[in-house]
């Protein structure tokens, strides 16, 4: 049975039975959109993955509790304030946001999920937020998906959205998603958020497993600066209005949606000038491959030379060597876009100009074969630029 | 018995029986000094610590073998070429450097230690280097220590040297040292090197233990960018010409010398505008304290806000949270120069202007109490600036 994906319009409101909206509640001094909401017309099966940071924002703590029930009717999001490191008051504020939505749409408070992104350590302007919720509820629209994509942006330079129609045999469902990037462009803004909707009917446990798998292949495979936010959240709501759908093609489609959004996040990373795919093959294990790939992708020195278009493979060898992965210097091959730079741990004698031509381009791959086993991993990353520092230094 | 340190002149030639020199051998196209040598008049007890990187430069491999004999007469160093990732030919070149020195000063090849620093992956200009060795031997001087400090600089902006006279009871010894920094200022230059001489007589095993202890408290407590070089080397030669000396004051003096040089390295880190001391107390263990301190000190986002003089403690909380150390959000206190920024995981309500005044200064401490145990660690680090990126992006 062949699965066919077709890109469609509408983002999170492309699947049946979802409405969304975004408004400016005055949380951001700039007056830009700073709140968004997604509502399912019927209670949806809900799955989520949350930051692994020990320091978790209040809305993360609240949503982790709420999602345990397995059902959700709405997601409410604000940008401009992370509601992190805000103690008991922060928790009360996050609960109040859920309660305000629940009261007005007529569901349980635990059926509302809450997300925040913005500066850490500042109490929420809760009066503005409650007014914002009221306004959002009046603005919900079955065409509101693209607007919600804008509403969750902090300093992303473009909204991140996708929607696909998925056909497997005679069955058709839709998946829509919006995300905001790991683009910590404005000082103190951080966090990745992603909200996925589908009209497929997927049992709770299967949905959670599918989401975990998709996230591991996408958002967990991108790195801009190696900093893990207190607020990272991915939520998937499946309202079942298009009926049951086989799991294998659903997984395939969910992976596709998540990988596309993850790549958009890297492309829109702060100050990014290059999109780099780091492919490790031949590692002793998949876990080792990931360790090696992350060591290369997060090396400050490696990222700096990519910025300058310098095919400096010595720094890549260095980063492989200090990673905790098993590496045998004499076995390492490194190529840029498949063109050999290193063979058996030493220079492959490809003319420097040829490698440089690859690395000055806005996107390229670094292909590393450790020749030790069958472990493999791909990480999507970017360079480190002066602009990144300027954008993040604050004040 | 009180130990008294007095700073003296002479760097590595301050202790009795050491001569040193530096010359320009033409390895660097700039014509700057690029080779140095330190010779002990009598075979010295030798101890060393080397990079933990799996990818080790040829001179590191050779010196690790040679130092096993426990005695050394000379150290020969070049900058401008790391002789790393150069395969079998690289090993032959490193051995040839040791052999050339040994032949001329009349010792075993294994009594000569070799170090290189510079670009990875390029074969050594061995003819120039052998000519350089001859020239160095003719230039050795009992006042050559400060010159050697200049000879091992790559793009350090100032030579790093120290010498002290150490008095314990009626016994007097001297310790001298030179180092080059983790200042990877010029593209493709990396590596920290440190050479320590003393005229104390210290048994081999005790010297190795003392050096390991001193390095752990100094060079292993600084971080500029978290990248561990393929060539990092610290060597200590003890020629015994001033006689035996008690171990406890020797350790104290060695620690002092290493910490001073380590701090100089951070100060001279690439593009650095702030010197930051990260103190962790109250961790569940010393190991946990180190993990937490490194997570803060190596966080790209934390380093960027220091550059802007922004006392953004949210990013510090974030970095603590994603470290693998045990952290309980509600127990964390953070202060800048002792002035509270966070108490029990939330804002301490010190006026922002007061914290900002501390963080805009060229040096300050971040004092973090995790309130979980008695583990503690101090790490010396710096900010991340646009200049760092510019200096490291190459081409």
Image: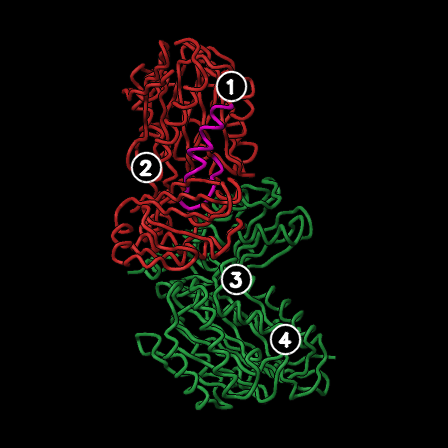
Chain colours: A green, B red
Residue at the disc numbered 2: B156
Q: Are marks 2 and 4 on the same chain?
A: no
Residue at the disc numbered 1: B206
Q: CA distance from mark 4 to mark 1?
A: 62 Å
Between disc 3 and disc 4, the foreground one is 4
- In the rendered image, which quarter is residue A207 located in? bottom right
Near mark 3 (Cα within 10 A), the count class, few <14, some 14-19 or many ≥20, is many
Between disc 1 and disc 3, the foreground one is 1
Q: CA distance from mark 3 to mark 4?
A: 30 Å
Of marks 1 and 2, which one's residue comes earlier in the chain?
A: 2
* Span highlighted in magenta in the image: B209-231
Residue at the disc numbered 4: A69
Q: Are marks 2 and 3 in contact (CB under 8 Å)?
A: no
> In front here: A222 or B243?
B243
Whether B220 is among the magenta residues is: yes
Q: Is B79 on the left or on the right of A255, as rendered?
A: left
Q: Which mark is residue A236?
A: none
Chain that bears disc 1: B
Q: Which image quarter is the C terminus of chain A in? A: bottom left
Q: Are marks 4 and 1 in contact (CB under 8 Å)?
A: no
Between disc 2 and disc 4, the foreground one is 4
Q: CA distance from mark 1 to mark 2?
A: 32 Å
> In front here: B28 or A120?
A120
Near mark 1 (Cα within 10 A), the count class, few <14, some 14-19 or many ≥20, is few
Q: CA distance from mark 2 to mark 4?
A: 59 Å
Near mark 4 (Cα within 10 A), the count class, few <14, some 14-19 or many ≥20, is some
How many numbered marks does the figure carry?
4
Residue A357 location (% of width, % of height):
44, 57
Disc 2 secondary structure class = loop
Residue B76 location (% of width, % of height):
42, 23
Disc 1 secondary structure class = helix
Disc 3 secondary structure class = loop
């Amino acid at each position: 049975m062949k699965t066919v994906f077709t890109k469609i319009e509408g983002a999170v409101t492309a699947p049946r039975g979802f409405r969304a909206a975004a408004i400016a509640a005055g949380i951001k001094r700039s007056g830009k959109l700073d709140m968004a909401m997604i509502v399912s017309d019927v209670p949806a099966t809900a799955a989520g993955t949350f930051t692994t940071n020990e320091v978790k924002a209040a809305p993360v703590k609240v949503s982790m509790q709420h999602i345990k029930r397995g059902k959700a009717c709405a997601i409410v999001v604000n940008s401009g304030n992370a509601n992190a490191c805000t103690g008991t008051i922060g928790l009360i504020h996050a609960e109040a946001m859920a309660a305000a939505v629940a009261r007005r749409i007529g569901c349980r408070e635990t059926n509302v999920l809450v997300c925040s992104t913005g500066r850490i350590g500042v109490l929420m302007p809760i009066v503005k937020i409650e007014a914002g919720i009221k306004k959002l509820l009046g603005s919900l629209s079955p065409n509101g998906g693209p607007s919600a994509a804008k509403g969750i942006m902090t300093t992303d330079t473009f909204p991140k959205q996708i929607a696909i129609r998925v056909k497997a045999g005679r069955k058709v469902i839709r998946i829509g998603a919006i995300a905001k990037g790991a683009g910590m462009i404005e000082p103190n803004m951080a966090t990745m958020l992603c909200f996925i909707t589908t009209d497929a009917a997927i049992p709770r446990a299967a949905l959670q497993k599918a989401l975990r798998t998709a996230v591991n292949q996408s958002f967990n495979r991108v790195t801009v600066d190696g900093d893990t936010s207190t607020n990272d959240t991915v939520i998937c709501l499946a309202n079942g209005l298009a009926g049951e759908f086989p799991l294998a093609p659903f997984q395939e489609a969910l992976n596709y949606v998540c990988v596309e959004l993850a790549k958009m996040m890297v492309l829109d990373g702060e100050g990014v000038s290059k999109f780099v795919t780091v492919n490790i093959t031949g590692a002793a294990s998949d876990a080792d491959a990931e360790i090696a790939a992350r060591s290369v992708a997060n090396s400050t020195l490696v990222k700096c030379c990519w910025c300058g278009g310098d095919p400096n493979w010595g720094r890549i060898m260095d980063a492989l060597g200090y990673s905790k992965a098993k590496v045998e210097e004499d076995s390492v091959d490194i190529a840029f876009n498949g063109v050999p730079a290193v063979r058996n741990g030493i220079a492959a004698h490809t003319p420097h100009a040829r490698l440089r031509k690859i690395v000055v381009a806005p996107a390229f791959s670094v292909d590393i074969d450790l020749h030790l086993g069958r472990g493999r991993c791909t990480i999507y990353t970017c360079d480190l630029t002066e602009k990144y520092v300027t954008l993040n230094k604050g004040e």
